[in-house]
Image (spheres, rainbow, N blue to C red):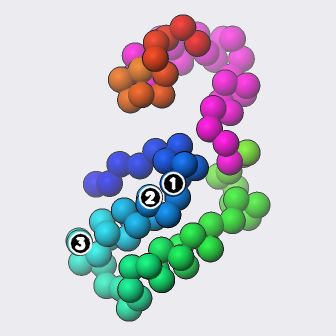
């Protein structure tokens, strides 16, 4: 399993795509391309305008999308996990 954070894609997409490529090839995924070219092709194929999974392409957008009730419920369920994973310093959001 390769753990990735969306924020890492935003800050250093080339490094993250390289990690994905390395992870796949180290587990037997065959590649006819050298790493640098494969990473460039992966990078060029990312088009947020064509993807239904992107809203804004920016980190932290959930804070404006969550209502006060959503925030309260989320804190109850996963607030400490957010802190543990480094997405926030505390549950004071």
Position in image of residue 59 (x %, y %): 62, 38
Q: Position of residue 10 (x, y in %)?
A: 58, 49
Report the residue marked by disc 2.
16
Residue 35 seen by the camera: yes
Q: Residue furthest left?
A: 27
Locate the C terminus and report the quarter of the image it occupies: top right
- Name the N-terminal-most of marks 3 and 1: 1
Badge number at residue 86: none
**The magenta stretch spans residue 68:** yes
**70 in relation to 61, above or below:** above
Foreground disc of the pair 3, 1: 1
Residue carrying label 1 = 12
Q: Residue at x 73, y 45 (%)?
A: 56
What secondary structure is marked by label 1? helix
Which quadrant of the rendered structure holds the N terminus?
Answer: bottom left
Residue 78 appears anywhere in the view: no
Sort mark 1 into few (<14), some (14-19) or many (20+) by Cα contacts within 10 Å. few
Please tell me how crowded label 3 is: few (under 14), some (14-19), or many (20+) other residues with Cα within 10 Å: few
Alpha-carbon distance for marks 2 and 3?
15 Å
Label 3: element kind: helix
Q: Is residue 38 above or below residue 21?
A: below
Position of residue 48 in the picture relative to residue 1 (left or right): right
The residue under label 3 is: 26
Check disc 2 and report its element: helix, strand or loop. Answer: helix
Q: Which residues are magenta?
A: 57-82
**Residue at image x 76%, y 61%?**
49
* Image x and y of residue 21, in percent: 37, 70
Mark 2–mark 1 contact, CB under 8 Å? Answer: yes
- Rendered location of residue 32, percent (x, y): 38, 91
Q: Which marked residue is nearer to the observer: mark 2 or mark 3? A: 2
**Magenta stretch prevailing secondary structure:** helix
């Amino acid at each position: 399993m390769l753990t990735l954070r969306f924020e890492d894609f935003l800050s250093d997409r080339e490094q993250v795509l390289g990690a994905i490529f390395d992870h796949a090839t180290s587990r037997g995924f065959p590649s006819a391309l050298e790493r640098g070219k494969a990473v460039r092709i992966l990078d060029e194929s990312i088009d947020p305008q064509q993807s239904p999974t992107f809203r804004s392409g920016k980190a932290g957008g959930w804070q404006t999308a969550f209502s006060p009730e959503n925030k309260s419920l989320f804190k109850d369920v996963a607030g400490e996990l957010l802190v543990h994973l480094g997405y926030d310093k505390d549950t004071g959001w």
